Image: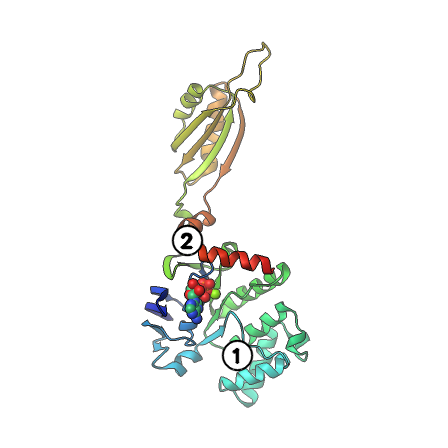
Amino acid sequence: MIAVEHLTKYYGDFLAVDDLSFEIDEGHVYGFLGPNGAGKSTTMNIMTGCLSATEGHVRIDGHDIFDEPEKAKRLIGYLPEIPPLYVSETPEEYLRFVGEAKGLRGSVLREQIEKVIADTRIGDVRGRRISALSKGYRQRVGIAQALLGNPKVIILDEPTIGLDPIQIIEIRDLIRDLGRSHTVIFSSHILSEVQTICDRILIIARGKLVAFDEPQNLERRLLAPSEISLKAEASAEEARKILSGVAHISEMDISGMDTDIAGMDANGKKENRVSIRVRTDCSDIYAVSRSIFFAFAKGGRPLLEMALKKANLEDVFLELTDNAAGEKDRDEDLEEEVED
Ligand code: ADP
Ligand code: MG
């Protein structure tokens, strides 16, 4: 459906998109995930023909976005990061204006406007000035204009940014609905959002594609193996001996606990307590924790605490983008928080 080939973009000397290549197939919801400044908006602006590339190609259904812009653009609906809404107009007037610009006329235009108003659920505010609408409604008007002309692909740049939690849920539901009838690509710097809506995730950092996979596969890549931390009433040697009989432990780290914290037993003898961290390569972390539980019971040493830390997509994301996110981007994040 969309082929992006060796896309590169320089702003002056600054390399914002670095030799990006990927393909988008029909019928999926793609999440374009990356920290602020990763190059998401730049890539989307190029993919939609709003910005020129320094090098590389974008083909929409075989049509080059630069050589055949009209044919290519007709297949895409785009909601930019800052949508050009005309705040003195009503949603209905605005949609008519955008529809005409997309070449729709007469009854086709009227039907299309009704359809996108219904799809984005803005019927109750259709006659109000856009300036009087909440940010959530404005964002829906922006999505409605992207849907005009019934394009196959909908591209949304950070559609939930700046919305309150309820509006965010509503927009996410809307994106999910759109995914039933369109190919959807939306960007976000929030992992959990992408994880819940998308069936394909592209992770971009410093203009480079660092991962492209289904959410489950990304989790399975488990860059950080699953970890279990334990506290047991045992000496380090006893704990080591007990754990040596448990399968699937790839690493263990045993340390004696502070003796001041360790209690006394009934005879006033100091008890041994150890803190243990084990790592496992087994995908079923509960199977491992069960074995550990029974091994300690069998060894006659009580387990006092057990906590599981499953590696998740968050770990993968942080690891993939960690070194890529520069100081500058972190500063931008801080500014955003202050504004909020
Ligand atoms: P994202 O959408 O992932 O936050 P952008 O594509 O907006 O990232 O920006 C990528 C990088 O390019 C950032 O470092 C940004 O500061 C820089 N950049 C974006 N637009 C311009 C521009 N018009 N001129 C110069 N630098 C830009
Ligand atoms: Mg952006």
Q: What is the quadrant of the C terminus in the image?
A: bottom right
Q: What is the quadrant of the N terminus in the image?
A: bottom left
Camera sees residue 95 = yes
Camera sees residue 44 = no
Q: Give x and y (percent) for residue 98.
A: 54, 82
For image coordinates 51% across by 69% down, the residue present is 81
Instruction: Examine the rendered structure and indicate whether residue 221 appears above or below residue 86.
Output: above
Q: Which residue is mark 1?
A: 148
The numbered mark at residue 321 is 2
Q: Give x and y (percent) for residue 9.
A: 36, 69
Foreground: 105 or 203?
203
The numbered mark at residue 244 is none
- Which of the 4 quarters of the picture holds residue 153? bottom left
Q: Residues within 10 Å of mark 2 (few under 14, many from 20)?
A: many
Instruction: Examine the rendered structure and indicate whether residue 300 appears above or below residue 22.
Output: above
| Sequence-first disc among 2 and 1 | 1
Q: Secondary structure at mark 2?
A: helix
The amino acid pointed to by label 1 is Leu
